[in-house]
Structures are given as structure tokens and as C-alpha cells.
Amino acid sequence: MRQAGFDGELPDRIRAFDEIVKTHEWSESAGSITQPIDYYRQFRGRPEGPNRVYDASDLPGVGYTRQVADTTRMGLGESWTEAGQPVREHPEPSSDLFTHTSGPNQHALITEQLTRHHYVMTLTMSTRQTYPTCR
């Protein structure tokens, strides 16, 4: 998991990242960029509960996949956080089976980035290994 803080217009950054990723042979796997861009345009600032409004952290993320070998596929997920709202805690995995986490606290990193930037993009990478079955 990695974060990058940025300023400017969120839809422009989503489009630019989409171009870069697709140039490097990743394909969309979980939704297109159209949905988060449209939702942000339509719902930004709408009340979402006590002391909270709809912002970048409410948007559906975008996912990409890339086949790297016959049995290995990589995934890349993109999500966003916006300054001015409480940073949400990401849920812990329901099981620690096959889960490895290391490094600094992600919540703290996002909070720190938001002191310098209006948005933080979070990238999550995963791999999936498929083993052939013998008959």
C-alpha cells in the first residue's frame, strides 16, 4: 500500500493515472473511472451524516489487473481521501491467513499527507497465484 499526496482537480488526476496504468498494460477490473468522476461531480458536498459531507473517500475505487505469467495475476486498486474530513479507518482483514502487513500506520501517513495536500491517492497492490490441478 502506498500513498501520494496531490493538489489540483481530482477528476484530472484520476484520468491521468488511468492513462499511465493502461500504457503499462494494466486493464480495468473493478469499475471504470467514469463512475467515481461522475459521483464526485454529482454528490460532492452532500451531507453524509453528523459532521460529514460526501467527499473523495466516499467514491468507489478503481481496480486494474495485469497478467504477469501463466499462473500469476497482479491487481492494483486506487482510492482517494480528501482534506477537511475525518480520515476514515480502513477495516482490518477478517482473517490473518495469507495476510502480511508491515510498515508505518497508514492512517497516520494519510493524515500527515493531508496537512500538505488537498488529496491523497492510496494504491494497493496484490498478487494472485493460480496453481494447476493434477488429474
Image: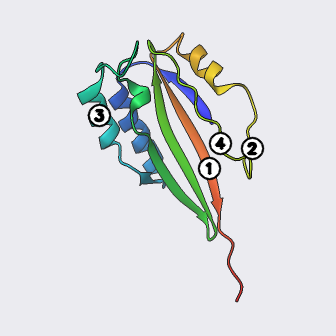
Packing grade of label 3 (10 A; few <14, some 14-19, many >=20) is some
Packing grade of label 4 (10 A; few <14, some 14-19, many >=20) is few
**Front label number (3 vs 1):** 3
Quarter occupied by residue 74:
bottom right
Q: Is residue 86 above or below residue 122?
A: above
Q: Amino acid at mark 4?
A: Pro
Identify which residue is drawn at 31% across, 19% down.
47
Residue 126's mark? 1
* Tag 2 residue: 100
| CA separation in Å, label 4 and label 3 | 27 Å
Q: Secondary structure at mark 3?
A: helix
**Front label number (1 vs 4):** 4
Is the residue under label 2 in contact with that under label 4 (CB below 8 Å)? Answer: no
Going from the N terminus, do you reach mark 1 or mark 4 first? 4
**Badge count:** 4
**Front label number (1 vs 2):** 2
Going from the N terminus, do you reach mark 3 or mark 2 first? 3
Residue 39's mark? 3
